[in-house]
Amino acid sequence: MVRHELPATRDTVVNVFGRDTPPALTVDAGDSVVVGSLDAAGYLEPMRTPGDPRPRMFEDRTGHCLTGPIAVRGAEPGMVLEVRFGSVRAGTWGWTLAGVKDNPLTRRLGVADGPASWLLWDIGDGTATNDRGRTVDIAPFLGVVGVPPVEPGPHSTIRPRAGSGERGKHRLP
């Protein structure tokens, strides 16, 4: 069993699912991989002020920034692969943006008519503090993981997308 490292670089990050995308890494069954990642929008450095334009991995945002693909030697289409995630650790900074789209959630929250509202976060061990001084507990989550659809071509990672189980209208809790 080998331990691999796959950092998030211009050579290892994509922003769409595509069955013809060559693997960034090929592993054997049972190997482990430490994967670096970016935020969904692919910012390469933190904003200094809310909305501050910063460099991104992809200037034309088609989908989320994904590190990979990772191929498993011997895996064939139709096989089921077991993937275990040992841990998910947040980076040291982040951001939240609300009120930029008119959708059921922003209407429910009363922010659909804008203006956009940003929060910039300094993330520590188990907590994050925003640029307004509020500190909250954090629970990092995995984000987007998956395999490309059978159909050729690039497929957006932004929902709803075919095959994601997110078809039709979304209901709010």
Image (cartoon, rainbow, N blue to C red):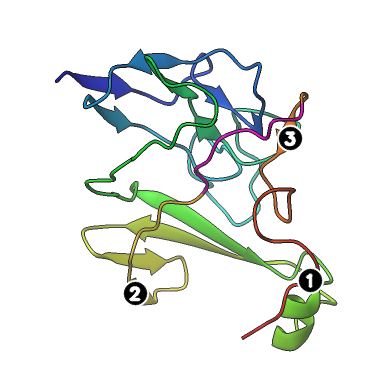
Question: Which residue is situated farthest in the front direction here?
Answer: 78
Q: Earlier in the sequence, mark 1 or mark 3?
A: 1
Residue type indicated by callout 2 = Thr
Q: Quadrant of the N terminus?
A: top left
Residue drawn at point x = 73 percent, y = 35 percent: 155
Element type where label 2 sits in the image: strand
Task: Locate residue 52, reporting x and y percent.
Answer: 63, 47
- Quarter of the view holding residue 54: top right
Nearer to me, 142 or 81: 81
Q: Is residue 9 left or right of residue 150?
A: left
Q: Is residue 168 left or right of residue 57?
A: right
Is 78 part of what is drawn in magenta?
no
Label 3 environment density (alpha carbons within 10 Å; few <14, some 14–19, many ≥20): some
- The residue identified by callout 3 is 155
Element type where label 3 sits in the image: strand
- The residue identified by callout 2 is 135
The boundaries of the magenta stretch are 144-151
Q: Nearer the viewer, mark 1 or mark 3?
A: 3
